[in-house]
Image (cartoon, grey):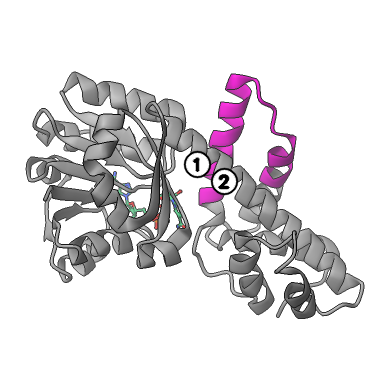
Amino acid sequence: MFKVGFIGLGIMGKPMSKNLLKAGYALTVFDLNQAAVEEVVACGAASAANGAAVAAQSDVVITMVPNSPHVKAAVMGPGGVLEGAKPGLILVDMSSIAPLASQEIAKACAEKGVLMIDAPVSGGEPKAIDGTLSIMVGGDKAVFDQVYDMLMVMGASAVHCGDVGAGNTTKLANQVIVALNIAAVSEAFMLAKKAGVDPEKVFDAIKGGLAGSTVMNAKVPMILEGNFKPGFKIDLHIKDLNNALETGHGVGSPLPLTAQVMEMLQTLHADGCGQDDHSGIAKYYAKITGETIGK
Ligand code: NAD
């Protein structure tokens, strides 16, 4: 069994690292937030002073931090993974970042003999806790094969999508679909509410039909409850749509619907809701109608 290092113990990293411990992996962890480190250490992990010290103890290092600059800092920065890594170490970046940044980081890794794959996830905190995430991977297929069993401790599926960056390109497609879905659901449920039909009844009536979706099942109950505790923060979804728009513009694939939903998210961010769950897109519709869908 690999000795595993885990950097980034936030909403996602904490339950993912705990599942690796439960599966019997020896784990060394690091986060800038000491309280998060202590919580995972209490479950059986060792802690290290920085990314370099994590790497020195590990065969495989997983990073699960917010965005491209955070991964670069954790891997390529002072005290980062590459300072402590032995040649042959495998870096699995599970953060959702820009595909071009994944390629840049993989290049810096290769110069030190470190093998890097990008392996972002979908499913959110509940599936991170259950170990049933969907994992989308870019990089050398032989490296993917080596870490497949470890990934399947955290996920229900792990699919090799192509070269380095392909995992994050797949994740951007996922994030476009999720954001647009939440906006569509919010718009439609507000229509029903304003027209005098109980949104709970609408949910019961349509969730099993063609409009039903994983997004609807996960997010409509939160919207009806008026519970916008994250989950997945609006500010993180802004980060993903930024990466999607930049990537789309770079490859000549316009994203008109994504641009529209991005402005809804920006409105919510400006209104102090950036730390809300992304189901808080419903609040945008509350803002423009003066009505709430749920409580
Ligand atoms: P989070 O903000 O809860 O946690 C991020 C953690 O990274 C924090 O504990 C922070 O202290 C740590 N960190 C940041 N920079 C660091 C560094 N240089 N060194 C060490 N630690 C560092 O974020 P999250 O919700 O866990 O998301 C992590 C990644 O997973 C993001 O890319 C996000 O887009 C993606 N993701 C999140 C969800 C979700 O539902 N929350 C779902 C799928 C994917």
Q: Is residue 63 above or below residue 166?
A: below
Few, some or many residues within 10 Å of mark 2 (<14, 14–19, 20+): many
Q: Is residue 74 visible?
A: no
Residue 39: x and y in percent read 22, 69
Query: CA separation, marks 2 and 1?
Result: 6 Å
Residue drawn at (38%, 44%) of the image: 95
| Residue 214, picture quadrant | bottom right
Q: Nearer the viewer, residue 101 or 218?
A: 218
Few, some or many residues within 10 Å of mark 1 (<14, 14–19, 20+): many
Q: Is residue 234 above or below residue 295?
A: above
Range covered by the magenta-colored residues:
236-262
The reply to whether the magenta stretch includes residue 250 is yes
Q: Is residue 114 left or right of residue 232?
A: left
Instruction: Check disc 1 and report its element: helix, strand or loop.
Output: helix
Residue 109: x and y in percent read 23, 26
Disc 1 target residue: 171
Q: Is residue 255 left or right of residue 65?
A: right
Disc 2 target residue: 175
Q: Is residue 215 left or right of residue 88?
A: right
Q: Are marks 2 and 1 in contact (CB under 8 Å)?
A: yes
Please name the amino acid that badge 2 sits on.
Answer: Gln
Identify the residue at the far right of this view.
195
Q: Is residue 86 left or right of residue 211?
A: left
Residue 289: x and y in percent read 85, 65
Please name the amino acid that badge 1 sits on.
Answer: Lys
Of helix, strand and loop, which mostly describes the magenta segment?
helix
